[in-house]
Structure formats: C-alpha cells, structure tokens
Image (cartoon, helix red, strand yellow):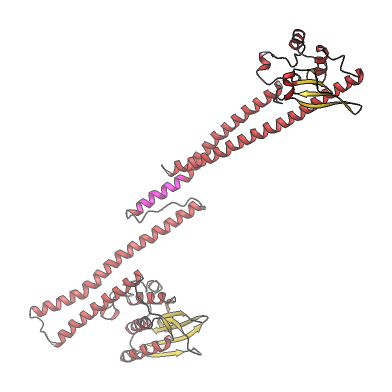
Amino acid sequence: MSIRIKLFLTFLLTTLLVVLGMHFFTRWSLEKGFTEFVEKRQQERVDKIIDVLEEYYAENRSWDALTGNKLKWISLLWRADPHQHHPPKWVIKQAQQEPEQWWPPRTLPEKINSRWPPFGLRVMLLSADKSILFGREELLSQLHLHAIQHANQTVGFLGLLPGNPVNQASDIYFMERQANLFFWIALVMILLSALIAWFLAYHLGRPLKRIAAAAQRLAVGNYQARLPVESNDEMGQLARNFNDMAAALEQAEQSRKRWVADISHELRTPLAVLRGELEAIMDGIRPLTSETIKSLSGDVMRLNRLTEDLYQLALADQGALSYRKVLLDPVPLLQEDLAAFIPEFNNKQISVISTNRLPKPLLINADPDRLSQLFRNLLTNSLNHTDQGGQLEIMIERLEDNLVIELADSSPGVSEQDITHLFDRFYRVDGSRNRHLGGAGLGLAICSNIVKAHEGTLVASHSPLGGLAMRIAFPVTP
C-alpha cells in the first residue's frame, strides 16, 4: 500500500470518526434536550388539568356529578389541552359505546395506536381514598399520582400512565425532520472530508514519492540526484537535507575515487623507480655498489613511510588509532623535537626563534607519542617548504582556556585557494614538487587527525613572514 493511500485512509478515517461522533452526540443532545422540553410541557399540562379539576371540585364540592358522566370527563380533559379544546369524534363515539370502566379506551384508531397514546388518553381520576372514578382497575399500579387539593386538603388524585412524552404529531415530525437533516449533513461532510483527504494525501504524498525516487537513484550510485525545494515547511527542510546528504555523498565518492587514484599514483612512482634501478643492476647497466644499495634503501624507506602514513590515516578513519593520554606539559616535547631538527635547519641556514609567553607550565590531556609525531610533521613541513636563508618563528602562549602553539615560516607562501585544501590527503601546493622533498601530501592530514583526537584545532593561515602559519590550540586541563 502506497504512502498516498495510507495518508488518505488516515485522514478519511479520522474525519469519519469526528463527523460520526459529532452526528451522534448532536442527535443525542437534541433528543435529550427536546425530551426535557416536552416533559416540562407535559408537567405544565398536568398542572393545567389539575387546575381545571380543582376548579370543578370547588364549584361542585364533590365528584358525584362527574362520576359516570363520560362526556363531562372528556370535556374537562380537553378543556385543559391548549392545542385541542374539543375531543375528537371517535373519543365521544367510543365513550357512548363502552361500558363503565372504559377509560382509557382499550382500542385506538390505527393512526394513533401506531405510536404512544396521546396525553389526554393517559389520564385517570381517583378519589381521595384512591378509588377509581374514571379509569381501569388493572392500570392502577402503573399510575404516577398527582394530588388534587381544595382548601388545603387532598380531594382526589390525577393519575398519569407512563408513555413517551414526544407523542404530538408536530413533535414527532420535528424529531424525524431533524434526524433526516443530521443524516444528510453528516453524509455531505463525509463526502467533503473524503475529497479534502484525497487532496491532502496527494499534496503530501507527491513530495514523499519524489524523495523515495531520488533516494532510490542515490542508492544505485547516482549521486547527482537532487530534489526541488518548493516550500519552507518540514517537507522543504527534508528536501534541503536530502540535497545536502546527496552532495556530501557525491563529494565523498569523488574523494574516494581521488583517494584510490592518488594511492595508486603514489605507490606506482617509488615502485617504478625501484624497479628501474633493479632492472639496471640486473642488466649490468648499473653496478651494484654501496651507493646503489643506499639509493635502493632510500626508495624502500620512502615507500615504507608512505605505507605507514596510509596505515595511520586508515586507523584514524576507523577510530582505531590508539591514544594513551596522560596529563603533560607539551612545551618540553616541542623543545625536544625542535632540538633534533636544529642541525637540518642550520644546513639550510634557516633561523629558528622560539618564544614561550607562558607564565607557568600548562597541562593538557594528550598522548606524548602522538604529540611528538604532530610536532615532527609540522617541523618537517616548515623545513621542506621554507627557502634557504629563511626564518621559522615558534610562539607559545595561552588564549583563554587554550594552550596555543604557532609555527610561522617565511616564503614561499601559499595562495588563498591552497590554504583551504592543505589538510586534504595527497594535496600538494605544487603538483610538480619533488616527492623526495614534499612527500606524498599526507603529513598535514595526519596532523589534523591527531589534533582533532585531542579535542583541539589546527588552522592554516598566511604567515607575517611571507610563508605559512600553523596554529594549534589545545584545551587546558583545569
């Protein structure tokens, strides 16, 4: 079942429940309210009949003149009826034909008997001692009695048989008409709800269908799949997030392809050199001397460094690069690594100035071996890419809650475009640079991973000396 059908059924069923609930509640409320109204009206009619009977008793001082006078009894009942002052002909006719205890009539015309008997046919008259004056003995136990009083004394009772208070033709017609009206209103609302539910399901299902199709294209490797952003609601945000994800996957795929190509290229170059030298030795073109062996060893060492760097990056990507962090002061580590590089800087006549502005040692949570690897990589980068006779300045200071170490060297510098890619793998500012100097372009990528693992930041910028500045910030342990 498609999402559009599910949405349609969900909207429709929800609306259907609401409409039906409103229909039945409104109908119940109407019937209850109308019944209460009719019951109140019935009580008013009972009070009216009692008033008529009390008036009759006050005039006659007894019920003797009324006893057995069927027509008089009927006329009193109907005189109290505000809707019908004269009894129907069939009532008078039946009163003349029936025996003494005939009220209420045992048989009613079909059009009346099909419903509850009218109000006047549910009334009986009893004396003060509850003996029947007008009525049938077998109905006595069903009566609801209402006292008839004269001079603060009970002189009789008006008995009312139970029945549906909604028995007037106008009342019944009104209730039936309202029931039919409610039914048609509910039906129209359900049909309108179905149309609205279908529209909403189509409107919401269409972007979801597009997203599903785009996701399917993405799953088979089409990373150029994009979605149009047509709104600023959640659907629009979902489309934007999908496009961002697709762009990230496309970039990751391009990086993967470039990564594989770069690895192949970087491995092929030293292997080709090594193979060429070995073939030259085998063909007798190049003698096997200590210099030749030293050259071969250098090629093997460069190949070994490359594979080691690749291995370190692979471990970092998998989160498997081991760190044994302890509280330490990184400044002595930096000074120790710098001391090991001083002879090489001197050989290139590069002056090194180290300034420590810390008033006291600061501790960070770090792995000393990884920090040493970080410092050596950065020092190697400055050594290889600083012109002879240049300068390297190292600044150590505290900025807020961070220990900051900055290495700034002199020319040559790098362009603004190159700075943003310095930490990309296999990236070189100069593609033709000698690999014997520049390496494979993995050193700064490894540095970036090490700094991130220590919850720090590594930022490259233009150096005031004309070269490159590397700024490391480590959070200080309180």
Residue 427 appears in the picture as rendered = no
Against 246, is 66 above or below? above
Against 278, is 12 above or below? above
- Residue 252 sits in which quadrant? bottom left
Q: Nearer the viewer, residue 76 or 436?
A: 76
Q: How many numbered marks have been drawn onto this rendered protein structure?
A: 0
Q: Position of residue 147 (x, y in %)?
A: 83, 27
65 horizontally vs 428: left or right: right
467 horizontally vs 82: left or right: left
Region of the chain picked out in magenta, as a range? 205-217
- Residue 25 sits in which quadrant? top right
Which quarter of the rendered picture does the N terminus lie within?
top left
Name the residue: 65% across, 18% down. Answer: 114
Name the residue: 33% across, 85% down. Answer: 383
Residue 410 among magenta residues: no
Name the residue: 38% across, 75% down. Answer: 448
Residue 214 among magenta residues: yes
Residue 245 appears in the picture as rendered = yes
Q: Position of residue 281 (x, y in %)?
A: 10, 80
Q: Position of residue 259 (x, y in %)?
A: 30, 67
Q: Position of residue 303 (x, y in %)?
A: 23, 77
Against 425, is 208 above or below? above
Name the residue: 59% across, 30% down. Answer: 183
Q: Nearer the viewer, residue 145 or 71?
A: 145
90 horizontally vs 399: left or right: right
